[in-house]
């Protein structure tokens, strides 16, 4: 009984691939040397001729005169050329003379008319120069052959495959069993998605268990979610757990300049996977080829991307249950995918990966902190609470940056201070030292204190965690607020309070200095964008619950690519009016709060000028305990 049935073809294929590559390399060398020979042989012949003798071109009359005078040793007549061979000189160099035939007569007739005595000189007649005929053919064929060889190498460079041009072969990378070190135990924070893929792996390992109950193997699994949540990592874990051939390819790798290449690569990929079944195909960033057909206009129906997508649709729909080939795809733009790609029978399962909650973040941190020495003071519960909104990639980067900070200061262990600084670096940017005057620093302090005071006093805002006038990234200062727990719903009241907090910095400038600065540009932009979303996306205005725009910025997916809502000019004017109404009301609220709390605002600024950064505890000592948040007010309510 052969227990290596699955692995043998792969081993055999590897040997055949090596032989094929060696043959291709040798063939390439032969072609190159032939080209070099064709290109440089005429020059080489001329060089040899000049090395062995001196060649001069003579008029026919001069040549005949030289022959009659006995200066020539022998004569060769070849077609339309008369070659004179002179005796060698004292240095052993032989001089050659060449003369061209004149119109209307042959060389022999010209020699006879001139009275050349053939008994005194050897005259050899060659009917036609074989070498000359050869070079005449070469001069015609060489450009054609050279162009063909050039195109051959260009095609091979583009395609990278093993067929005549290599361009239609897929570039999928094969991960054989045992080659992937990532397992499901290395993935955390996405338990639901992991369970779905564990089931897919079990389908491939134990197909009989499901077939006995009449279940068929899922044909495709689509992983969606924002960047950094672990879509590709999950696919690598599938490769490590499945124990079957795993073919990985990016969506952009199907595309080439030549039409039809993408479809050919799709066919080749699926054919290879079927031969190695049971197997898994992973297509990363599938939105590169899976966008809605016809979204680019009426003339786009036959472009390369659409042909590639059509071929994928055919290959996936053409599977039979016995194929045992599962397609796993990943994208962070499911809203642009073609509806035919998403229907059952192609991608049967759609798994959405969200940003991890507090338990997920703690599990992810547990994985990434292995191998790093941390101080005992580090509170991982606090770190998990601090990193609301962080993806798995952000958390990994945070711990790596913390380790770099500790190493920079030659410390043996990583402390809480390093983690906090690393979190700020990932979230906002690295700290920058800017030379500012005292007046500029104080204006920055009032701006940030304005955000913090308004945010602290309005219950719809998240708690203020840190206020700083230390420059980071492009900002001269920052105010950091984070919720106590993960939030999945946002009310209109919370959004209105958030608008007021965004405009608190601008309001503080006006209240204190009766002046405006350019530092509020980003706040104004964010506030305007949020107010517009409240009107056109959330229906939180007097216009009512109408979908007046399309946005995928905050992960609100579902509308297909190209579905733009048409809005009349009158309605657009109403939208602009409602947006301005929301922003103006928020600004008035912020200004009113700061005027009432002017003394408290000055105290916060005074402390900021001393220490530059206020943590939550220090800030709340000045401000007092925050008002109960809307979430806390509703803790006693029941669903």
Image: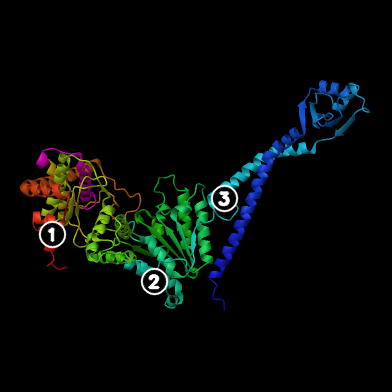
Q: Position of residue 242 (x, y in %)?
A: 44, 70
Q: What's the magenta region?
A: 510-538
Looking at the rendering, which quadrant does residue 482 occupy?
bottom left
Q: Residues within 10 Å of mark 1 (few under 14, many from 20)?
A: some
**Tag of residue 629:** 1
Q: Which of the colour schemes (rainbow, by chain, secondary structure, one colour) is used? A: rainbow
Dots 3, 1 in contact, CB < 8 A: no
Vertical side of 627 occupied by 508: above or below: above
Q: Residue at x 31, y 48 (%)?
A: 564
Q: Is 513 covered by the magenta stretch?
A: yes
Looking at the rendering, which quadrant does residue 350 occupy?
bottom left
Mark 3 and mark 2: span between their CA atoms? 40 Å
> Image check: 604 left or right of 546?
left
Q: Residue at x 62, y 54 (%)?
A: 24
Q: Nearer the viewer, mark 3 or mark 2?
A: 3
Q: Position of residue 561 (x, y in %)?
A: 35, 51
Mark 2 and mark 1: span between their CA atoms? 42 Å
Q: Residue at x 70, y 36 (%)?
A: 43
The residue wearing badge 3 is: 156
Question: At numbered mark 1, what does the secondary structure look like: helix, strand or loop?
Answer: loop
The residue wearing badge 2 is: 199
Which badge, 3 or 2, is on the more N-terminal residue? Answer: 3
Q: Is 62 covered by the magenta stretch?
A: no
Question: At numbered mark 2, what does the secondary structure look like: helix, strand or loop?
Answer: helix
Q: Residues within 10 Å of mark 3 (few under 14, many from 20)?
A: some
Q: Nearer the viewer, mark 2 or mark 1?
A: 1
Which badge, 2 or 1, is on the more N-terminal residue? Answer: 2
> Image check: 594 left or right of 141?
left
Q: Position of residue 515 (x, y in %)?
A: 13, 37
Looking at the rendering, which quadrant does residue 115 occupy?
top right
**In which quadrant is the C terminus drawn?**
bottom left
Mark 3 and mark 1: span between their CA atoms? 65 Å
């Amino acid at each position: 009984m052969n227990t290596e049935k699955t692995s043998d073809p792969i081993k055999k294929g590897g040997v055949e691939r090596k032989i094929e590559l060696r043959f291709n390399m040798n063939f390439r060398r032969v072609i190159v040397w032939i080209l070099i020979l064709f290109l440089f042989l005429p020059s080489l012949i001329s060089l040899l001729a000049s090395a062995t003798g001196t060649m001069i071109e003579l008029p026919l009359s001069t040549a005949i005169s030289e022959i009659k005078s006995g200066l020539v040793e022998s004569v060769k007549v070849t077609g339309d050329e008369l070659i004179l061979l002179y005796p060698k000189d004292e240095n052993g160099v032989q001089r050659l003379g060449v003369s061209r035939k004149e119109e209307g007569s042959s060389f022999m007739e010209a020699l006879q008319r001139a009275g050349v005595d053939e008994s005194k000189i050897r005259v050899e007649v060659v009917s036609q120069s074989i070498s000359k005929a050869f070079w005449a053919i070469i001069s015609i064929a060489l450009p054609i052959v050279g162009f063909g060889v050039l195109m051959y190498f260009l095609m091979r460079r583009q395609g990278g495959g093993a067929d005549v041009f290599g361009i239609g072969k897929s570039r999928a990378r094969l991960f054989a069993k045992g080659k992937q070190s990532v397992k499901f135990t290395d993935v955390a924070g996405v338990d639901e998605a992991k369970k779905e893929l564990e089931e897919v792996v079990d389908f491939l390992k134990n197909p009989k268990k499901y077939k006995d109950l009449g279940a068929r193997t899922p044909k495709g699994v689509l992983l969606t979610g924002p960047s950094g949540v672990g879509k590709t990592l999950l696919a690598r874990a599938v490769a490590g757990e499945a124990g079957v051939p795993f073919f990985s390819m990016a969506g952009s790798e199907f595309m080439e300049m030549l039409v039809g290449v993408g479809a050919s690569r799709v066919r080749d990929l699926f054919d290879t996977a079927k031969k190695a079944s049971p197997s898994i195909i992973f297509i990363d960033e599938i939105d590169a080829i899976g966008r809605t057909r016809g979204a680019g206009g009426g003339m786009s129906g036959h472009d390369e991307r659409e042909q590639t997508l059509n071929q994928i649709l055919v290959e996936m729909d053409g599977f039979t249950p016995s194929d045992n080939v599962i397609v796993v795809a990943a994208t962070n733009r499911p809203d642009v995918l073609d509806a035919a790609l998403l229907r059952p029978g192609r991608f049967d399962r759609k798994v959405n990966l969200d940003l991890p909650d507090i338990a997920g973040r703690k599990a992810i941190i547990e994985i990434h902190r292995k191998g790093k020495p941390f101080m005992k003071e580090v509170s991982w519960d606090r770190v998990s609470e601090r990193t609301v909104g962080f993806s798995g990639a952000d958390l990994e980067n945070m711990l790596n940056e913390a380790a770099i900070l500790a190493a920079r200061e030659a410390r043996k262990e990583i402390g809480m201070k390093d983690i906090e600084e690393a979190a700020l670096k990932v979230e906002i940017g690295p700290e920058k030292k800017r030379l500012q005057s005292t007046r500029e620093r104080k204006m920055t302090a009032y701006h940030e204190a304005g955000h913090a005071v308004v945010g602290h006093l309005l219950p719809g805002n998240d708690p203020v965690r840190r206020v700083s006038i230390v420059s980071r990234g492009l900002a001269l200062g920052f105010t950091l607020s984070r919720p106590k727990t993960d939030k999945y719903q946002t009310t209109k009241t919370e959004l209105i309070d958030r608008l007021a907090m965004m405009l608190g910095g601008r309001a503080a400038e006006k209240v204190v200095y009766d002046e405006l600065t350019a530092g509020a540009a980003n706040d104004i932009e964010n506030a305007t964008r949020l107010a517009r979303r409240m009107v056109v996306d959330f229906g939180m205005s007097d216009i009512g619950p109408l979908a007046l725009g399309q946005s995928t910025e905050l992960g609100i997916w579902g509308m297909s690519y190209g579905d733009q809502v048409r809005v009349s000019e009158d309605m657009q004017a109403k939208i602009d009016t409602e947006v301005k109404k929301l922003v103006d009301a928020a600004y008035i609220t912020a200004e009113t709060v700061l005027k009432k709390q002017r003394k408290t605002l000055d105290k916060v600024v005074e402390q900021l000028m001393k220490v530059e950064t206020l943590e939550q505890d220090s800030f709340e000592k000045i401000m007092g305990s925050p008002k109960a948040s809307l979430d806390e007010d509703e803790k006693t309510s029941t669903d």
